[in-house]
Amino acid sequence: MRAMHFIMFIIQNVKKNVEGMITLDEMLTKGRYTLSSFMSKSEGPFQVVLKNVTVTAKANLMVQMDGQLMTDSIDMDIVFKQMSMDFQNLGFMGSVFQSIMNSAPNLVFDGMKPFMLKEADTKMRSEIDGNIKKMMGDRRLPNSISPLDMAIAEGRKKVREMGYDPFHLPNYNKTVGVFSISTINTYITGASSFYRVGDIILSMENNTVSSKFLIGTQKIHGSTQWEVGMGIGLVSRIGHAQFSVEHIKVGVDVSQALDTRKHPQINDLQINLGNIQVRMDGLALWIM
């Protein structure tokens, strides 16, 4: 699946700790689909056209070790006003499937959303950092960030570079008797939003250095598409699920002997989960 026309975005306004808006007159997404049922199987190309797309975003800036001001993290959401879909070669199931998709555009859009946000994230970083570089020139800012905060910032960057935000979970299939369940397009976003909470406490006793600190995340979002079936493709129902965790906080108490031949030891680990919300949407139509 490919998202097109992302090159044509416009940043309408930029404020400190950068708040911006991207507008796209039209976005075209192309790909291939496979539709299987008890009576037939269809596959072929498809395209989805989104119109009047708006992406709102807030970017946090951070001074790097070399004194350059750059984008640290971006929190985005994307909405649209109109959607049209065209699935070719649908055959016998064409009218049923097309009516289902047209009656639930959000179901299709939520499956595409992680791909779109990832591409928008990359282009926004490039645009913001390019404008900052033009504005700052060769000037450098004082860097008073603590070593732990710098390590956390590098960790956030590494998580994004390794493709863990958004994180794509493998597709899942399970069959029990005549019943089956499967999930596809499962994504979790926000894994790279972790930061230090409160002060770091350091102490030394009996030639052992101890450190206590708390790491928290911003809001974690997740989404998946599910299908529940009965029989061998005879009856099935599909839907979409979303969940969010307000925050995740991890408190760590770690110690290290001054004799570095000994390994660090975790004395205490506490995990606190914020408010958890789950929303499920299912199509009120059984396909036979």
Image: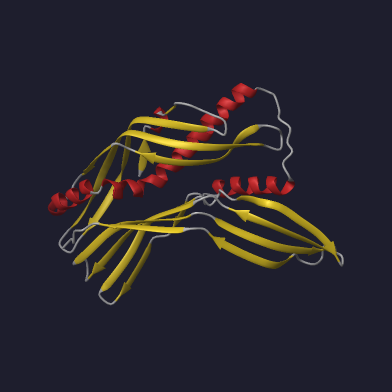
Q: How many marks?
A: 0
Residue closer to the observer: 168 or 254: 254
The C terminus is located in which quarter? bottom left
Residue at the (27%, 41%) spot, across then down:
47
Q: Closer to the camera, 125 or 53? A: 53
Rendering coords of residue 146 (x, y %): 73, 45
Q: Is residue 36 left or right of residue 22?
A: left
Residue 203 lies left or right of residue 131; in this view the side is right
Is the residue 208 above or below the residue 5 in the image? below
Q: Is residue 191 above or below residue 144?
A: below
Instruction: Give the quarter of the figure containing the N terminus.
Output: top left
Q: Quadrant of residue 120?
A: top left
Name the residue rendered at 73%, 36% in the picture: 143
Residue 252 in the image: x percent, y percent? 67, 61
Specify whether 151 is left or right of 161.
right
Indicate the quadrant where residue 71 lies: top right
- Residue, x 46% and y 41% (percent of image)? 76
Q: Along the line of sight, which residue is nearer the eye, 184 or 67? A: 67
Q: Where is residue 156 in the image (x, y as percent from the top left)?
A: 60, 47
Q: Position of residue 46 (x, y in %)?
A: 26, 44
Which residue is located at x 35 percent, y 66 percent? 173
Hey, which residue is sitting farthest bottom in the picture? 177
Determine the image quadrant of residue 230: bottom left
